[in-house]
Amino acid sequence: MTSSHGHDGSSPAAGAQARRNDAAGADAPVRRAQARTGTCAPAPLTALPLQDRAGARLSGSCDLDTRQSLSTALRVVSGIPGPVVHLDLSAVVFLDAAAVAALVQASAALHGQGRRLLLHDPPYSLRKVVEMFPDECAALEVAA
């Protein structure tokens, strides 16, 4: 007779519910941003230069609607001189998989120049994509 329980003694349904609860909690910043703006539209993406080091601070959402803005921001950030370029993501509420891929490409391009792209305070969505695709995201470097 086979068991319907996982290795940790929990049922598959309980594990699925836990993942749904984690995902619902991860979307809380997105919902708060939407509530502040009074719309269901994601927050627009903006990029501002950092005052204390070479790099930029992104804020908003990185998804299909803001893909071009992210691409432009990453081109500008990649052109900043210096051995380390910092990207503050503390005000980013969401990154879709394509946005994470764009970060990987930018990081790999800088690495090819002997430089580094250092990510600060990544949102939950980026951490989850890295967790699901560790090999593909190996070029990403997150500040401790």
Image (tube, helix red, strand yellow):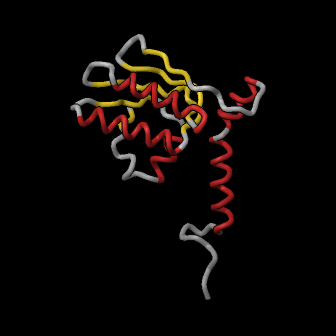
Tell me if I can see residue 139 in this picture.
yes
Who's the residue at 57% across and 37% down the image? 63
**Looking at the picture, how far across and down is residue 137, in whole percent?**
39, 46
Instruction: Return the residue found at the far left.
Output: 114
Q: Is residue 42 left or right of residue 58?
A: right
Q: How many marks?
A: 0
Instruction: Return the residue found at the far top.
Output: 51
Who's the residue at 45% across and 26% down the image? 72
Who's the residue at 33% across and 42% down the image? 139
Who's the residue at 66% across and 42% down the image? 25
Tell me if I can see residue 144 in this picture.
no
Looking at the image, residue 102 lies above or below residue 38: below
**Looking at the picture, how far across and down is residue 8, in whole percent?**
55, 67
What is the quadrant of residue 26 in the picture?
top right
- Foreground of the two, 114 or 24: 114
Instruction: Return the residue found at the far bottom.
Output: 1
Instruction: Return the residue found at the far right.
Output: 38
What is the quadrant of residue 144 in the picture?
top left
- Foreground of the two, 4 or 49: 49
**Looking at the picture, how far across and down is residue 78, in whole percent?**
35, 26
Quarter of the image with the N terminus in it: bottom right
Q: Is residue 81 left or right of residue 126?
A: left
Q: Is residue 64 left or right of residue 52?
A: right
Looking at the image, residue 18 lies above or below residue 102: below
